[in-house]
């Protein structure tokens, strides 16, 4: 049995807030996600207080008492204050009611009661409040049967879902995200309301959309959320490239995999072993280039030649459109998508040291992530085939270790730099430098020379002597 009173009294901040509120006769409550997570036993680092009174002064006075050196962040326009104590975020806000204009999800805010504040919240499981008042200390205030919905694992809005989602369409994405994170089912009326309101996401910023999308992708079984996005029509507005991978074509009684469902299977398999957001994005987009490269030939059947290269180009445009990071995170996803066929090709044939060197050179520090995706990409229903592939991947991993120990090709830099080349031959920057560097790289990758300064310098002199003797003077 959950002992809320004991939990409240053992949290120094909550206890101090309760004492202050009771002493000054200020109706105060702990609300929202903290209460929800407390009841279901889920860890949380955020505690929100709602009070009918001056939230800024209460926060300021409480912080002075428990930790006067900690800085209080104040947002007067919103009537909120925030501080972090012992790695927990505490936020204070005045009880309020909201009204929305048609073209914005930013509400007009007025002061209100705790009932008003609960009505404005997105889902019944987030309307729960714990009273810190003397008359009903630690009682749960539950006007919308949020406790029943938690027991029955239901996501439901406290008011008419059509109005709730029309006012703030971000709540449609939050419903799907909570469904994934908590393993709850979205109430059928809410699901229908989402389907009827999908066009409303046009008023959302791309950043808010991708924030929720990232949280869905980070769950243990992201396919649940992606399928809900697809079923409601949201996916076609957010990531139409993925929606377009659905379906199977049949010619001459030959068909191909449904790329969409294969992709989700890969994403789920990967998610059991990794919480790496950008590797999960690579899994989600690894076959995104297949629809535009799909061809049928009687001799070969269905082919998707070059889909990894096309897919990598598409990643760039998708990241730009969704306002995802256009930095090393995008570069990482592009590289993994472009290289995801390479390890598979290696395990299907005799693995040479040269091929392994080239894979290590191109994947660099991302080789382990690439191998993890490739192993998740094995979705055959034939257990013998899966066993064979996994064993081959195991052998390839061992080969990668052996070659790396010998040749040190991760994060490879030429043992002989461009500056050394220019100084040795007394030449300025130009195409000759690139030609020599390429020859050195290829010689190392082919195993003709060691990945060392002395071997490389000697090779460079021999190469220039045979192919560009004019540089020797």
Image: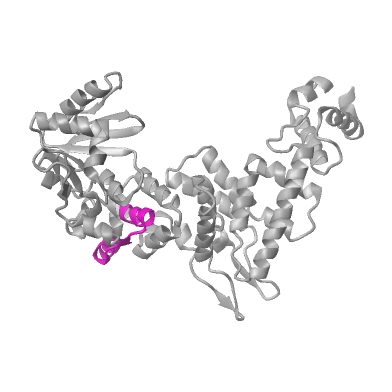
Q: Is residue 389 magenta?
A: no
* Closer to the camera in the image, 29 or 74: 29
* Closer to the camera in the image, 467 or 28: 28
What is the quadrant of residue 98 in the picture? Answer: top left
Q: Position of residue 356 (x, y in %)?
A: 75, 48
Q: Which residues are magenta?
A: 174-197
Q: Is residue 343 above or below residue 330?
A: below
Q: Is residue 412 above or below residue 374?
A: above
Q: Residue at x 59, y 53 (%)?
A: 373
Q: Is residue 111 above or below residue 253?
A: above
- The color scheme shown is one colour
Left or right relative to 8: residue 136: left
| Residue 32 visible somewhere in the drawing | no
| Residue 173 visible somewhere in the drawing | yes
Q: Position of residue 391 (x, y in %)?
A: 70, 59
What is the quadrant of residue 290 in the picture? Answer: bottom right
Q: Where's the C terminus, which quadrant?
A: top right
Left or right relative to 87: residue 444: right
Q: Residue at x 15, y 50 (%)?
A: 119
Q: Is residue 176 magenta?
A: yes
Q: How many marks?
A: 0
Left or right relative to 195: residue 268: right
Q: Residue at x 51, y 57 (%)?
A: 267
- Specify the principal SS of the magenta part: helix
Q: Position of residue 116 (x, y in %)?
A: 12, 46
Q: Residue at x 49, y 70 (%)?
A: 247
What is the quadrant of residue 298 in the picture? Answer: bottom right
Q: Position of residue 464 (x, y in %)?
A: 87, 31
């Amino acid at each position: 049995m959950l002992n809320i009173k004991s939990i409240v009294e053992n949290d120094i901040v909550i206890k101090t807030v309760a004492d202050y509120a009771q002493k000054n006769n200020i109706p105060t409550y702990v609300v929202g996600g903290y209460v929800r997570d407390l009841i279901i036993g889920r860890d949380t680092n955020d505690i929100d207080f709602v009070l009918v009174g001056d939230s800024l002064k209460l926060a300021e006075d409480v912080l002075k008492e428990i930790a006067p050196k900690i800085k209080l962040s104040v947002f007067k326009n919103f009537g909120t204050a925030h501080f972090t104590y012992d790695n927990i975020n505490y936020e204070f806000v005045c009880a309020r009611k909201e009204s929305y204009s048609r073209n914005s999800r930013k509400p007009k805010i007025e002061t209100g009661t705790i009932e008003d504040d609960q009505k404005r919240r997105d889902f019944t499981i987030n309307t729960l409040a714990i009273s810190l008042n003397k008359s009903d200390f630690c009682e749960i205030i539950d006007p919308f049967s949020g406790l029943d919905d938690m027991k029955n694992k239901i996501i439901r809005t406290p008011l008419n879902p059509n109005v709730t989602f029309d006012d703030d369409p971000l709540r449609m994405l939050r419903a799907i995200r909570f469904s994934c994170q908590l393993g709850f089912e979205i109430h059928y009326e809410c699901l229908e309301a989402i389907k009827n309101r999908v066009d409303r996401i046009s008023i959302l910023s791309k950043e808010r959309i991708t924030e929720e999308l990232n949280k869905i992708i980070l769950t243990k079984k992201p396919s649940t959320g992606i399928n809900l996005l697809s079923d409601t029509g949201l996916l076609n507005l957010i990531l139409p490239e993925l929606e377009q991978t659905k379906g199977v074509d049949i010619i001459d009684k030959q068909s191909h995999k449904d790329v969409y469902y294969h992709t989700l299977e890969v994403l789920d398999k990967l998610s059991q072993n990794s919480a790496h957001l950008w590797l999960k994005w690579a899994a989600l987009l690894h076959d995104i280039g297949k629809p535009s490269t799909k061809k049928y030939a009687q001799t070969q059947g269905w082919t998707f030649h070059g889909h990894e290269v096309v897919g990598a180009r598409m990643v760039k445009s998708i990241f730009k459109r969704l306002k995802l990071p256009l930095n090393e995170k995008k570069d990482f996803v592009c590289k993994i998508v472009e290289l995801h066929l390479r390890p598979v090709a290696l395990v299907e044939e005799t693995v040479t040291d040269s091929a392994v060197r080239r894979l290590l050179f191109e994947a660099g520090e991302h080789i382990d992530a690439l191998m993890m995706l490739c192993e998740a990409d094995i979705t055959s229903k034939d257990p013998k085939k899966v066993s064979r592939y996994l064993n081959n991947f195991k052998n390839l991993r061992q080969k990668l270790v052996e070659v790396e120990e010998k040749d040190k090709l991760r994060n490879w830099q030429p043992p002989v730099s461009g500056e050394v080349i220019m100084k040795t031959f007394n030449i300025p920057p130009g195409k000759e430098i690139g030609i020599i560097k390429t020859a050195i790289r290829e010689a190392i990758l082919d195993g003709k020379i060691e990945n060392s300064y002395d071997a490389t310098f000697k090779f460079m002199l021999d190469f220039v002597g045979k192919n560009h003797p004019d540089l020797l003077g």
